[in-house]
Amino acid sequence: MSTTRDPDRLVLFTDAVVAIAITLLVLPLVDIVPEAVAEHRPSIEVITEHRPQILSFLLSFAVIAQYWVTHHRMFQGVKAYTPALVLWNLVWLLTIVFLPFPTEMTASYSDDRFTTSLYIGTILASSVCLFAIALIIHGNPEVGGDEEGLTARTLIRLLTPTALLVIAFLLAQIPAVNYYALLLLLLAPLVSRAVRGRTAASE
């Protein structure tokens, strides 16, 4: 059963939590500056000696930003919400708030398999939550504004990034691959388009 209450309050709360989480990513970089000053190191070393931290920050910023954009688009057509939608939204927020922690670990344990699994696993968990949210929105006409409901095309579009992340998580266990497995996400639009084309042709 859905409630007719306007979902704006849920969206505003979500946006605020995401904004805080994405801001927390930069705090470890801010702490580097006074440390470098205290050790009388040249300012350029703040960048050159901490490239892994900076790259981890940029990657996690891009991930959270992309997931927020996806979440924002999904909720544009939401006209009501259910307890299940609220629950999955909170679990998704948990993955977003947690992400700065493995992000910081990647800078110090860049080649550690556990750290790699934790980092990509967190992103995968976040993607699974977004998929569950999308299923609730598109599968319930009282919640979502899409009258067509959960079509095969919509399902493929939503499932593709999660499926690629599962593959990336497995490939990341290979030491030589590591975080490069995340580059698979760049293929999401192409894979989704190809699968939709084959689905349409078979109908």
Image (cartoon, helix red, strand yellow):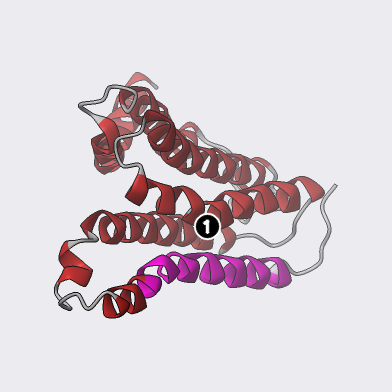
- Nearer to the camera, 64 or 7: 64
Q: Position of residue 19 (x, y in %)?
A: 52, 71
Q: Position of residue 110 (x, y in %)?
A: 31, 42
Q: Quadrant of the C terminus?
A: top left
Q: Looking at the image, which residue is at 56% across and 64% down?
A: 76
Q: Is residue 154 above or below residue 90?
A: above
Estimate how packed mark 1 is, as few (under 14), some (14 to 19) or many (20 or more) residues with alpha carbons within 10 Å.
some
Q: Looking at the image, which residue is at 65% across and 40% down?
A: 139
Q: Looking at the image, which residue is at 55% across and 71% down?
A: 20
Question: What's the magenta region?
Answer: 8-31
Residue kind at label 1, given as amino acid type: His
- Nearer to the camera, 7 or 171: 171
Q: Is residue 177 above or below residue 84?
A: above
Whether residue 49 sits left or right of residue 195 in the image: it is left
Q: Secondary structure at mark 1?
A: helix
Residue with the mark numbered 1: 71
Image quadrant in which you'd find residue 189: top left
